[in-house]
Image: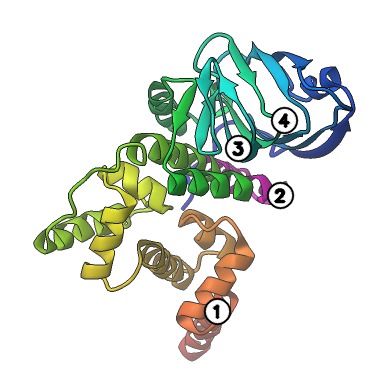
């Protein structure tokens, strides 16, 4: 069963969208930042912000149509990074050249300076370390040590994976207030882990991809390691990014391992094993919400779809059949 949750942190989530027609108003969208915008190119300025904030995490998609000199600092004890979705023109981050596949680390130095191009759309992630689940602080500190340059060049595929991760997180909803506090806490912790592991993988592994592919006999040993990580909900790996970080392997190596040893992709394998664990929880009488959350399925509708694809029935059907079986046994015993 779920362990008691720590003191409840309200699951407050805010989505906002704004349009600014002067640089000063646009700079004020970054809550808690000390920030100054100076327009460098001619023409009417227009800035747009789409922001999702919840429990110490903020994801901010910013669109600017003029060249801007940005100077400032992020709040204390925060990790702040950004990856361009679109970047057209000359850009510099703390004096270093920036491209579409450059990770901008705003929290690398006490102060930063970013000269944006004529047009850019950047998605920023800010993580307040004091607001993280205590279990995730070690991950956050590990990430901090890797973010040692204000402009980190990434491989194109790693940069794209990070864009997809941040955009998906921005669109994801938070657990509702109707759920028990312990489940809300667990879901929040898992979301934090997805973001932290995704960033750690991007910076530490994708930036250094040169690892020999394992020999075929090693593939089975690696698969056994994966199965051990999947055996318990406390250690269960929820994403390929987390698996890469935990095993210190690249995605390319993992793809090879799973194709050879399991005949399927890492994503499909992880999902199938976790679905089987969730099914066992249902057969023990747990609720659908608990079974899904315990094994890292944060979206119940997606969980129900994947469950039906694998087992040919909805999780609620499994649950109803168990209840009927128990009723029949109870009737027979009377």
User: Does residue 234 appear in the picture of this structure?
Assistant: no
> x and y percent of residue 244 in the render?
33, 47
Nearer the camera: disc 3 or disc 1: 3
Residue at 35%, 62% (x, y): give it: 266
| Residue 53, position as x, y percentages in the image | 70, 35
Q: Is residue 328 above or below residue 69?
A: below
Residues rendered magenta in the picture: 170-189
Give the total number of marks visible in the rendering.
Answer: 4
Q: Which numbered mark, 3 or 2, is in the foreground of this view?
A: 3
Q: CA distance from mark 3 to mark 2?
A: 31 Å
Task: Kindly tell me whether residue 21 is visible in this rendering.
Answer: yes
The residue that appears at 61% across and 59% down in the rendered structure is 299
Badge 3 or badge 2: first in the primary sequence: 3
Quarter where residue 21 is shown = top right
Q: Which numbered disc flags the more N-terminal residue, 4 or 1?
A: 4
Q: Could you say which disc has been placed on residue 242 in the image?
A: none
User: What element does badge 3 sit on?
Assistant: strand
| Residue position for label 3 | 84
Toward the top, the furthest residue is 110
Residue 305: x percent and y percent? 58, 73
SS class of the residue under badge 1? helix
* Label 2: which secondary element: loop
Residue 253 in the magenta stretch? The answer is no
Q: Which residue is mark 1?
A: 323
Residue assigned mark 4: 118
**Who comes first in sequence, dot 4 or dot 3?**
3
Tell which tag, 4 or 1, sits nearer the viewer.
4
Q: Residues within 10 Å of mark 2 (few under 14, many from 20)?
A: some
In this view, the residue in front, 162 or 86, is 86
Q: Residue at x 33, y 71 (%)?
A: 264
Where is residue 304 shown, x and y percent of the image? 58, 71
């Amino acid at each position: 069963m779920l362990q008691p949750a720590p003191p409840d942190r309200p699951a407050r989530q805010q989505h906002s969208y704004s349009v600014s027609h002067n640089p000063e108003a646009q700079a004020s969208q970054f809550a808690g930042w000390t920030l100054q915008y100076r327009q460098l190119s001619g023409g009417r300025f227009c800035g747009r912000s789409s922001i999702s904030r919840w429990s110490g995490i903020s994801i901010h998609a910013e669109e600017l149509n003029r060249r801007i000199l940005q100077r400032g600092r992020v709040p204390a004890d925060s990790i702040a990074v950004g990856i361009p979705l679109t970047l057209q023109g000359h850009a510099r981050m703390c004096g270093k050249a920036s491209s579409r596949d450059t990770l901008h680390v705003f929290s690398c130095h006490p102060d930063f300076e970013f000269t944006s191009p004529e047009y850019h759309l950047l998605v920023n992630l800010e993580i307040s370390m004091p607001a993280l689940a205590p279990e995730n602080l070690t991950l956050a500190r590990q990430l901090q040590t890797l973010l040692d340059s204000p402009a980190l060049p990434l491989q194109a595929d790693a940069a794209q994976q990070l864009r997809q991760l941040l955009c998906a997180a921005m669109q994801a909803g938070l657990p509702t207030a109707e759920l028990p506090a312990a489940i809300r806490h667990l879901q929040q912790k898992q979301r934090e882990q997805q973001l932290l592991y995704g960033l750690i993988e991007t910076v530490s592994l994708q930036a250094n991809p040169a690892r020999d592919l394992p020999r075929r006999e090693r593939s089975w040993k690696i698969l056994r390691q994966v199965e051990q990580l999947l055996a318990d909900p406390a250690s269960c790996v929820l994403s390929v990014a987390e698996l890469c970080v935990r095993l210190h392997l690249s995605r390319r190596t993992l793809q090879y391992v799973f194709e050879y040893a399991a005949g399927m992709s890492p994503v499909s394998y992880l999902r199938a094993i976790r679905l089987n664990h969730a099914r066992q929880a249902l057969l023990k009488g747990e609720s659908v919400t608990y079974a899904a959350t315990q094994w890292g399925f944060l979206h119940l509708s997606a969980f129900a779809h994947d469950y039906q694809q694998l087992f040919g029935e909805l999780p609620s059907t499994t649950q109803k059949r168990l209840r009927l079986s128990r009723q029949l046994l109870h009737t027979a015993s009377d």
